[in-house]
Amino acid sequence: MSSVNEKIVYMDNNATTMVAPEVVDAMMPYLTDLYGNPSSMHTFGGQVGQAVSGAREKVAHILGADPEEITFTSCGTESDSTAILSALRTLPEKRHVVTTRIEHPAVKSLCDNLETLTGHKYKVTRLKVDAEGMIDMGEYEAALTDDTAVVSVMWANNETGNIYPVEKMASMAKERGILFHTDAVQAVGKIPIDLQKLDIDFLSLSGHKLHAPKGVGVLYIKRGTLFVPFLTGGHQENGRRGGTENVASIVGLGRACDLAAENMENENSRVRQLRDKLEEGLLAAVPNSRLNGHKTLRLPNTANISFEFVEGEAILLHMNQHNICASSGSACTSGSLEPSHVLRAMGVPFTAAHGSIRFSLSVYNSEEEVDYIIEKMPPIIELLRKMSPFWKGK
Ligand SMILES: *Cc1c(COP(=O)(O)O)cnc(C)c1O
C-alpha cells in the first residue's frame, strides 16, 4: 500500500470524492466553536439552525427546488429506502414496483427484499437494458399498471455513467397516478437538474459523491407529495426525519453544492475532454478493449472499459503499484468474483465483463494524469494477458 503522503492519481470519483478544501473550511466552525443544537431555543443553538437553513437553500438551488422540499438524511442509501418505502405506505392498496436491472445496490437490494422478505406481498418489475445499457421506453410503458405504486429509476448509472430519460419517465408515471423516485446520486453536480418543471416526486443525492463528506445525504420530496418518514423521533427536518442533524456535514454539503454549480461548466468541457482523451487513448493503445455503456448519453466524467481475457482485480492491483486508483465493476461488487450485475444486464460477454475497469474523473484531475494512465496501462494488460489461459495471443 502506498503511504498517505505519496501522490496518487485518483480516478475513482464515482466511489467517493475528495472533500473540497472550501468545504472543509465551511465545516470547521461547526466542529469547533459552533456546537449548539440547531433545535435549541437559545441564540447559540439558533445560529447553528440558521447555518442548516442556509445549506438547505443551497441544496435547493442546485436542484431547482424549494428549500422546504429538501430533507437531510445520513446518506444516499437512506434517501433511496425512505422514498420507496414512503411511496408504498402512502399507497397501501398498490403492490407493484417498477425499477431497472442496473440500479445501485441501495435500490436493488431494497426491491429484492420487498419481494423476498414480505413473502412476495410486493411484485417488482425490473426493466431490461440493451447492449449499450439503455431502457426500452415501450417496455417501460407496458410495465406501468393500475397496481403500480412507485417507479424507481436512477438518473445516471454509477458503473457506466449512462444517463436515463427520467424526465419523460416521470411524466409517464404521473399520468397514471404513479409516484416517481430517482436515485440522482451520480447526476447531481455533473449535469444540470431543474426539478421545478418535472414530475419527479422523490430524488436522492449523497454528499460524498460531490466533494462533501461521507455520511450526509438529501431526499427531495416534491411539494404536495404524500410522505411517511422512515426514521421517526424528534421533530427535526419538519417531522420528516428524526435525529439531530449532522450539522457540520450539512453545512459542508451546502458549500459543495455551490461549488458544483460553479464547476458544472468545467465538468462538462475540460473534464469531458480529459475523459475522452483517456478513453480514446486506451481503446487505441490496447487491442481487444471495448467501451461499456452509451457512447454519448453518458456523464462527462465516466469511462468503463473492458480489457478482454484479463481479470479486473489483477489489473487494479497492478494499477495500484503505480498509485492509480480506479474500480472494477462497482466498489460494492469488487469484493466478489461475480461480474457486476450492470454489465451482466447489458449482456457484456463473460471474458470482457471480468476485465472491466471504471475510470471516474473529477475537476481535480489533470491532463498529466491522463497521459500517465495511457502510458502505464498497455504494459499492464500485456503482462496479464501473457499469463492468461484465455488469451490466445490475438
Ligand atoms: C454511492 C451511491 C449510492 C449510495 O450513496 P451512499 O451515500 O454511499 O449511501 C446510491 N446510488 C448511487 C448511484 C451511488 O453512486
Image (cartoon, rainbow, N blue to C red):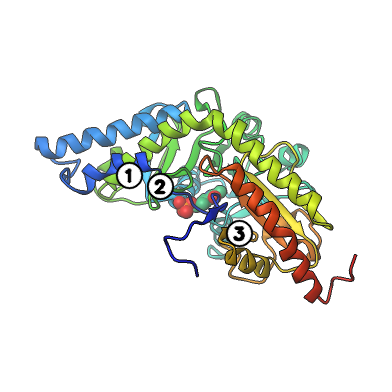
| Residue at image point 59% right, 57% down | 326
Dot 1 and dot 3 residues touching (CB under 8 Å): no
The reply to whether dot 1 and dot 2 touch (C-beta < 8 Å) is yes
Type of amino acid under label 1 = Val
**For residue 182, side relative to residue 348 (left or right):** left
Q: Is residue 374 left or right of residue 80?
A: right
Q: How far is mark 1 from mark 2, CA to CA? A: 7 Å
The one of 243 and 211 positioned closer to us in this rendering:
211
Instruction: Name the residue type under label 3.
Output: Ser
Residue 324 location (% of width, % of height): 58, 58
Q: Which mark is residue 77?
A: none
Residue found farthest to the left: 42
Q: Residue at x 53, y 46 (%)?
A: 93
| Viewer-nearest residue: 261 or 79 | 261
Residue bearing the label numbered 2: 19
Q: Are marks 3 and 2 in contact (CB under 8 Å)?
A: no
